[in-house]
Image: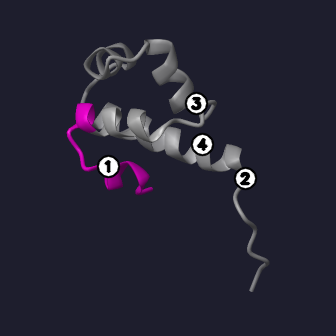
Amino acid sequence: MGIMTTPTEHDIQKRFGAHVRKLRREKGLSQEALALVCGLDRTYVGSVERGERNISLVNIHLLASALRVPVKVIFDD
């Protein structure tokens, strides 16, 4: 049995962003289209997907609504 390590903030952001990207692609949306529906900037959505942002709860809700999934689905990986 290996030693359990706590994921870093960056690890969490990267996993979250990768999952947002996966969901966006499954919906057939570009970053620009998703950003437009959310009312966010495309560069912001890109930085979330790359794990560069510690995104707010409000923006998580906006992304979930735009992707038409419950908020909890965004956290599934």
Q: Is residue 17 left or right of residue 53?
A: left
Residue 62 image position (x, y, % from top left) = 32, 32
Residue under label 4, please give it: 13
* Label at residue 8: 2
- Residue 18, placed above or below residue 8: above
Quadrant where the N terminus is found in the figure? bottom right
Residue 68 image position (x, y, % from top left) = 20, 39
Q: Amino acid at mark 1?
A: Val
Name the one closer to the observer, 65 or 24: 65
Name the one closer to the observer, 38 or 3: 38
Q: Are marks 1 and 3 in contact (CB under 8 Å)?
A: no
Give the structural element (helix, strand or loop) at label 3: loop
Q: Are marks 3 and 2 in contact (CB under 8 Å)?
A: no
Please give the range of residues in magenta.
Answer: 65-77
Instruction: Select label 4 or label 3 by which is in front.
Output: 4
Q: CA distance from mark 1 to mark 4?
A: 16 Å
Q: Is residue 72 left or right of residue 9?
A: left
Q: Residue at x 60, y 43 (%)?
A: 13
What is the quadrant of residue 60 in the picture?
top left
Q: Residue at x 41, y 32 (%)?
A: 59
Q: Are marks 2 and 1 in contact (CB under 8 Å)?
A: no
What is the quadrant of residue 40 in the picture?
top left
Instruction: Select label 1 or label 4 by which is in front.
Output: 1
Residue under label 3, please give it: 50
Q: Sequence-wise, which precedes: disc 1 or disc 4? A: 4
Quadrant where the C terminus is found in the figure? bottom left
Residue under label 1, please give it: 71
| Farthest-out residue, left | 68
Residue 67 image position (x, y, % from top left) = 26, 35
Q: Sequence-wise, which precedes: disc 4 or disc 2? A: 2
